[in-house]
């Protein structure tokens, strides 16, 4: 059967993507924790790549927050005195960007992987029983 895309609505196109994007080749399943770890790495790598280009998907306060946290960790006992500049820069960036920046919508990658049953069932992770249709 041929699947024809008739529009751009989120619900119907997502349902059709699940049908079209079924894995074609079988391979051994992997642990759910390993899949979660891979997704975390992919997101981290993607955010680093976006941060270099000044992509609007990355929060503009991220760099000042990182500098503030590093300074606080470097001086845990005297951070109130030694980290004043970093805290000021972070608060200034928050005040500037708190109303204008919105986080982008994320793709539910883990849900897609679970739908395709790519994970091995273990004591910690079990697929839900299929609902009667």
Image: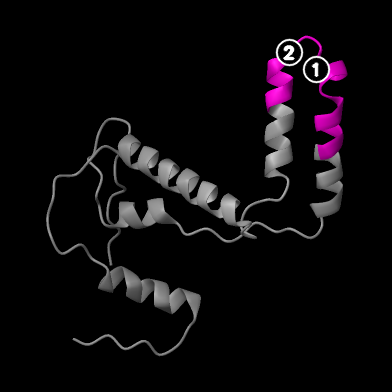
Q: CA distance from mark 1 to mark 2?
A: 6 Å
Residues packed near mark 2 inside 10 Å, few (<14), some (14 to 19) or many (20 plus): few
Q: From the viewer's perspective, is 51 left or right of 24?
A: right
**Residue 114, horizontal then vertical, whole percent:** 32, 51
- Residue under circle 2? 76
Q: Residue at x 55, y 54 (%)?
A: 50
* Quadrant position of residue 101: bottom right
Secondary structure of residue under mark 2: loop
Q: Is residue 71 magenta?
A: yes
Q: Residue at x 12, y 60 (%)?
A: 25
Q: From the viewer's perspective, is 86 left or right of 62?
A: right
Can you name the residue that lies furthest to the front here? 52
Q: From the viewer's perspective, is 53 left or right of 15?
A: right
**Residue 31, horizontal then vertical, whole percent:** 26, 37
**Residue 125, horizontal then vertical, whole percent:** 31, 37
Q: Is residue 69 magenta?
A: no
- The magenta segment is 70-89
- Residue under circle 1? 79
Can you name the residue that lies furthest to the top here? 77
* Quadrant position of residue 108: bottom left
**Residue 2, horizontal then vertical, whole percent:** 22, 87
Q: Residue at x 72, y 36 (%)?
A: 65
8 lies above or below 33? below
Q: Is residue 125 visible?
A: no
Q: Nearer the viewer, residue 93 or 16?
A: 93
92 lies above or below 75? below
36 lies above or below 20? above
């Amino acid at each position: 059967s041929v699947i024809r895309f008739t529009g751009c609505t989120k619900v119907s196109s997502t349902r059709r993507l699940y049908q079209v994007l079924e894995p074609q080749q079988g391979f051994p399943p992997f642990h759910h924790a390993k899949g979660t770890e891979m997704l975390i790495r992919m997101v981290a790598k993607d955010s680093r790549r976006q941060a270099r280009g000044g992509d609007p998907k990355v929060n503009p306060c991220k760099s000042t927050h990182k500098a503030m946290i590093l300074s606080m960790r470097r001086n845990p006992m005297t951070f109130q005195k030694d980290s004043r500049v970093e805290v000021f820069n972070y608060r200034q960036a928050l005040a500037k960007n708190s109303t204008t920046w919105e986080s982008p919508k994320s793709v539910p990658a883990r849900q897609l992987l679970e739908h395709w049953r790519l994970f091995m069932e273990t004591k910690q992770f079990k697929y839900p029983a299929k609902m009667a249709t």
